[in-house]
Image (cartoon, rainbow, N blue to C red):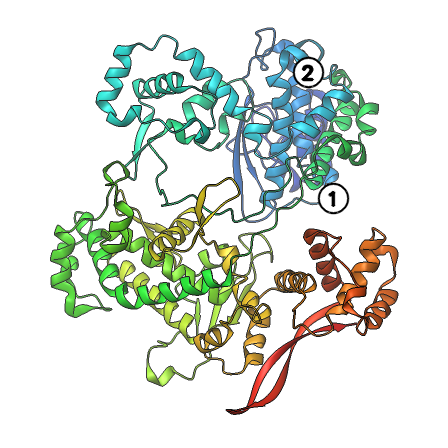
Amino acid sequence: MSLIKKMGQVLPNDQEKKWTEDELSKLRYPERIAILDKFKAEGGFGDPQIDCPDWLVNGCNFDSPVWFCSLGGGDRKISIKVDFNVRLEDGSSLLDFQNSELLRSIKLFLCLQIHTRYNGGCRKVADVEVDTFKWALKFIDNLLLNVDEFKIAEVNFGLLTRGAVLEYLAGKTGYPSSTCLYEYPSRLANFLRNETKSISAEDIADARSLWPEIDELPAVSDRSLDLDDEELLKARTYIVKRGWYSKQYGAIKYNSRPFLECLYENTLMGKELVPKTFSELNESIVHKTEYPAVPVRNPPAIGVSEKILSRNIRVLKKLVLVQHMIPTASVDAGMLARIKLKGIVPLIDKKEKGRYRTLPGTVVFDLIRDSYEYIVKNKQSVMVNAVLWCLSNHRSEIKASQAHRAMRFKSSLENRLHARAATGQWLTTYSMRPDNYFDLFRAKPVLYDAYRVLMGSYFCLIGALTARRQDELLGLQEQNCLYPNKDPNLLENKKINYQMTFKAGKTGNSKSRKAVRVPIPMMVARLLWDLKEIHRELVRFELVSKAAPLLLYIQPDNLVVKPMDATLYNNCLSAVCDYAETPVIKLEDGVEARFYVRQHQLRRFFALVFFHSSGFKALDSLRAFLGHSDPLHLYTYILEVIPGSMLDTVKADSLTDAVFSESATVENLNAVRGILCQTLGVQGIFAKSPRELSKIAKQSMSTDYSALDISQFSYDEVQSNIELFLRSKLIDLQPERISFSCDKGSLNDIHLVVKVA
């Protein structure tokens, strides 16, 4: 009698029960082994992390035709659906009995990506597991997209050669995968070209009656799809006929989902792609700015990073285990074992990390001033009107009396503003914008535009004066963001040193970040208090839940209040830049572009002003703005709010500008020039030990400037080397107070000095 039968009164018959990994782990050892042996006898692997892994949910297991996955070893989970019903080169389905060994090999390959035995002995956080799992899916999709070449229905992985693996790693693992692997732009263009051959003039006329602006085509230079004017017009008509357009914030946009389902029906992951939409198929972008944007990041080299390459290699190496466990998989294990990162790097254009571009100090400083003035003049009327619009729109869900209840932050104007909200204009849709829209946007904006500018003004000030990451600001909570939770506008609280509480980025996963408090100027405390009052009003009127984050957004199309996200945050910043008319410059290609600031640029503002103060005369204004009379007090505040790595980058930028300048005022600058000549001159930072470099730096302090010529080196290599010197603590750039006498008496100022370890 088998062990299963002996324990029949304890263990249900495994044909009547689908065991889970968690349930098996709770059984006694002999009971668990008995069930796993039964799994193995029926074609399983005798391993609960493969036969019934706990990340397969909704009742599915290894043998299910569709997998519902819930990935992540922590509290946070991410769901993925994998449907194995795909067609192969011979017309059969992957689920057909004849392909059972191939299907089993593919499923095992996926399971091994999550198996703790082959991943350091533990489950990873959700983002890591999902990335790894998706890379495995993408590799299988590469085979499915090229089934005529690999003939996997006939020989499984037998035609997977070294050349094919190298081609995949070097050419198809880059970002975005929708372009690098799935070739979405070219496949979509070909699909539309073929599908629209039968579109007639009558069809176009019918579509024109529904979309009068259908003939307004963007210039060829502004298109991403390889379609001429006639093909593009037919493509738009094709989408109209099938009802795949919708109005979003007043602009016509198409739905990508039907295209993905047609183009990638025989892939495991292609149907779930989230590719960018192509503007030439839409009426226009939803939040169109007045000018193109000055690039906020230097363009990196085209290619794939070594980090992504190495991770994909680890994913593919699991095929060696597949061959060991399923010999019929026909994997060339020896070939895969010989695949090394150093053998692939020469075949690709290495993707360097693009550096964020630095904004001119005057751009940010002027924008801060304009944002502050806008908030002071408009916050009451704009926010009262916006909330009343929301109340009017949701009258069926909220008691009518609440719409007339006095608002706490401006009760005296309530009746007049309510009448204005009921009759004024909330939104000018894109299709209704006049030619002079942006002139009206600045002179007499509709309420939604004024609301966007107001929120952008808050983001600009808070973002620049706190130097936090965008996701840290988006995660602020109304209940605890300000400490102590007292009104900073009251005279009795004017001496309080306020702090901001937030979940610090890069201190864990998104669900378990460390709560941090940092000091903030009184101005930021007052701005946060404004947003807290707005939040409380929205909660009081039942427009949003109390648990919603501090930063909220009123959707223009239905006036529903939702949490602010990164895209909307950036749209608000762009709005205030258009309103304040930040500078417009001409790019290298002759295109006029505007500085549209982003939070990663605002974060650097403090340090940039401080360390470039000799060239940018706004330091005194900044000190007054923050309430710091002493420059060194300002520097102390900078050290408290600016992360060390960012501070090193700013110092490196400042020193790089200085070493190339003949009029720099930084003391001991020749120390930097001296070690640059030593390291760059012999093509290697490690040519000298840190102790030797320190000695050279000190000796160079007294060397004549003309003897330390660094003009032969590029700006980028000088900057990167200086940043390395700073991170290794070989040098540092610090301020020192100096006193001097003048007509006004004795004054204090700061002087930047290079310190050598």
Q: Is residue 5 visible?
A: no
Instruction: State left or right for residue 668 relative to residue 465.
Output: right
Comes first in the chain, label 1 or label 2: 2
Residue found at x 58% / y 67%: 612
Q: Position of residue 251 (x, y in %)?
A: 30, 35
Q: Are marks 1 and 2 in contact (CB under 8 Å)?
A: no
Q: Which residue is mark 2?
A: 101
Instruction: State left or right for residue 701 relative to residue 750.
Output: right
Q: Quadrant of residue 458?
A: bottom left
Q: Nearer the viewer, residue 120 or 386?
A: 386
Q: Position of residue 636 (x, y in %)?
A: 58, 76
Q: Nearer the viewer, residue 66 or 178?
A: 178
Instruction: State left or right for residue 620 relative to residue 107.
Output: left
Label 1 CA crowd tier, 10 Å (few <14, some 14–19, many 20+): few
Label 2 CA crowd tier, 10 Å (few <14, some 14–19, many 20+): some
Q: Nearer the viewer, residue 596 or 173?
A: 596
Position of 495 relative to 94 (above/below): below
Q: Secondary structure at mark 2?
A: helix
Q: What label does residue 120 carry, if any?
A: 1
Instruction: Tell me the quadrant of the picture where the C terminus can be found.
Output: bottom right
Q: Amino acid at mark 1?
A: Gly
Q: Nearer the viewer, residue 135 or 358?
A: 358
